[in-house]
Image (tube, rainbow, N blue to C red):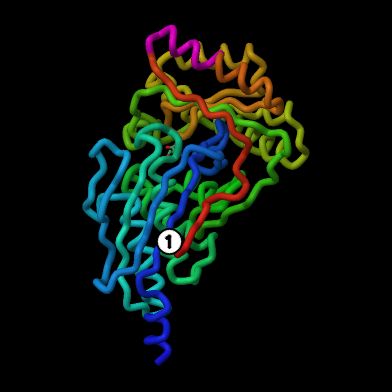
Amino acid sequence: MKNIMRQQRHVNRKATVFAPASVANVACGFDVLGFAIEKPGDIVSATTTKEHGVRIAAIKGDDGVLPLELHKNTAGVAALRTLEHIQHVRGEEFGVQLVITKNMPSGSGLGSSAASAVAAAVAVNALFDYPISPEDLVNFAMKGEAVASGSEHADNVAPSLLGGITLIRGYKPLDIVRIHVPKELCAVVVNPHIIVKTKEARAILPKKIALKDAISQTGNIAGFIAGCMREDYALIGRSLVDVIAEPHRAQLIPQYFAMKQAALQAGALGFNISGSGPSVFALTNDAQKAKVIARAITSVLKRAGVGSTAFISAVNTTGPKVKVV
Ligand code: HSE
């Protein structure tokens, strides 16, 4: 009886979710730090169907490059894992159909695959009245993200899903810590119009790092967290240093060091690669200066004949936006 009532409640429901882009690594926190921005973001609509399982009905805005096959699609896998879990604990009888709208390219360094995976996982969870907590949902969205990047990391998924600045304290089990967001912190994110595949950007990294580099990275990540907690913008800026990924990945991004110099000269607290690139980010505590920094970075690219899109955003502390009908 309970099952029948539940089925009636959930028939033909539709949940539409916007999940925001995010900046992963934040220079010093390879695979463990990330923050969400206001826009861009991907949108996934999920509708309950009588047929079991998950089906991707359409993908918009991807220029036909993303796969409709469920197991090859980040949103598809995230939705499937979420639905399987809900069916396991609640015995739901429904399937789900997805329509995915991409508002940023894959391989942009803006957390595009994570945003799609998060939007899909949150949409399925919303359809069934949120049986899974946002923190637990990160696990299922992360399975989707792994399809695109070849490894399970949550530094884009966690901030996109939970909002704010997040630290992955540990992966086994997943232990996510929300970091205080300094009130005036503002991000400039610039996406040069080229593609860098996360899988390839990960493949060029060394498997081992030197002790001196581990010491440097540890000091900087601790400095970044302390800087956020104390709203000490100079400390945040000094901590935006990466000795693990930047030395290897800078070569994948046109004009990287020229952009960095221009951003710092324009007054940025710090500058680095957003996720696995090619997007880059700078931080400031001055919203007016953000425009000057954005212009400085995009001008370098323009002079080199590379088109780009700039986003200026406070840290997005609210995460996904959900509408259920
Ligand atoms: N931490 C990841 C990386 C983010 O740098 O490879 C990109 O998904």
Q: Residue at x 57, y 23 (%)?
A: 271
Q: Is residue 58 magenta?
A: no
Q: Residue at x 53, y 25 (%)?
A: 272
Magenta residue span: 296-305
Q: Residue at x 66, y 23 (%)?
A: 269
Q: Nearer the viewer, residue 69 or 295?
A: 295
Query: What amino acid type should be assigned to the residue bearing mark 1?
Result: Ala
- Name the main secondary structure of what is drawn in magenta: helix
Say left or right for 123 vs 196: right
Q: Nearer the viewer, residue 296 or 237?
A: 296
Q: Which residue is mark 1?
A: 15
Q: Residues within 10 Å of mark 1 (few under 14, many from 20)?
A: many
Q: Where residue 305 sits: x, y (%)? A: 38, 10
Instruction: Name the residue at the top extreme.
Output: 303
| Beta carbon of the mark 1 residue lies under 8 A of ligand 1 | no
The number of discs equals 1
